[in-house]
């Protein structure tokens, strides 16, 4: 067993098993077709389970798969069968909670697609090259929000600055009439 926990992939699929956001960290699935086949297989295997309240853990093709569903999104984290299930579950929970924070608890496919850049940044903050970097959702969301802004600030500061910019534009238009 390695000293650092290793993640093979993180998947965010819709309610039909189609990709919303995915990130692979190993060459266990060398082609796009192999990746799509794995995603489809794991989706079909977990479809009949009730993983809405808590994350579920299953073994699939000599891998540990931890998954959780919310609305029309299915979250999956895959690791080797020699990894600690609790660490893999913590990675999933960190991803799930960070997405909830970034999407302001409107976790559904439409909102996820509209904010895909934030979700992909979120994946980058959690795992790099298969090595787990961070699992605390508030830290992940804070780093992603900082990357998403031109300057340094939080999500609430971004909203206020957008409101001020809109108010300035309306005032300028009304003065120019």
Image (cartoon, grey):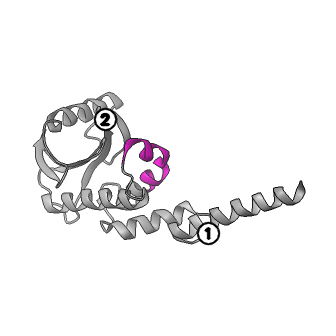
Coordinates of residue 82 in the picture (x, y in percent): 11, 54
Magenta part of the chain: 108-121
Q: Which residue occupies 31% across, 69% down?
A: 136
- In this view, the residue in front, 62 or 112, is 112
Residue extending farthest to the right is 177
Which labelled disc corresponds to residue 30? 2
Q: Is residue 78 left or right of residue 140?
A: left
Disc 2 element: loop
Coordinates of residue 25 in the picture (x, y in percent): 32, 48
Q: Which residue, given by chain and number where applicable, does mark 1 sit on?
A: 151
Residue 84 appears in view: no
Query: Is 111 covered by the magenta stretch?
Result: yes
Quarter in which the N terminus is drawn: bottom left
From this view, report whether residue 37 is shown above or below residue 139. Answer: above
Which label lies toward us, 2 or 1? Answer: 1
Answer with the quarter of the image where residue 17 lies: top left
Q: Which residue occupies 18% across, 32% down?
A: 44
Coordinates of residue 152 in the picture (x, y in percent): 57, 72
Residue 153 appears in view: yes
Q: Is residue 98 left or right of residue 149?
A: left
- In this view, the residue in front, 68 or 161, is 161
Mark 2: give few (<14), some (14-19) or many (20+) Cα within 10 Å.
few
Q: Are marks 2 and 1 in contact (CB under 8 Å)?
A: no
Disc 1 element: loop
Q: Which residue occupies 57% across, 64% down?
A: 159
Answer with the quarter of the image where residue 6 lies: bottom left
The rendered magenta stretch, by its main secondary structure, is classed as helix
Q: Which residue occupies 71% across, 62% down?
A: 167
Which labelled disc corresponds to residue 133? none
């Amino acid at each position: 067993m390695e000293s650092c926990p290793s993640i093979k992939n993180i998947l965010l699929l819709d309610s039909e098993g189609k990709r919303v956001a995915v990130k692979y960290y190993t060459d266990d699935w060398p082609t796009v077709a192999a990746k799509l086949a794995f995603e489809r297989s794991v989706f079909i295997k977990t479809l009949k389970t009730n993983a809405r309240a808590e994350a579920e853990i299953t073994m699939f093709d000599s891998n540990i798969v931890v998954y959780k569903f919310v609305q029309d999104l299915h979250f999956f984290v895959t690791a080797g069968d020699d990894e600690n299930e609790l660490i893999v579950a913590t990675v999933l929970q960190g991803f799930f909670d960070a997405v909830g924070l970034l999407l302001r608890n409107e976790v559904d496919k439409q909102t996820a697609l509209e904010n895909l850049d934030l979700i992909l940044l979120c994946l980058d903050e959690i795992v790099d090259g298969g090595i787990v970097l961070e699992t605390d959702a508030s830290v992940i969301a804070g780093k992603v929000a900082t990357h998403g802004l031109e300057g340094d600030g939080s999500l609430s500061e971004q909203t206020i600055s957008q409101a001020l910019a809109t108010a300035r534009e309306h005032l300028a238009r009304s003065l120019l009439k």
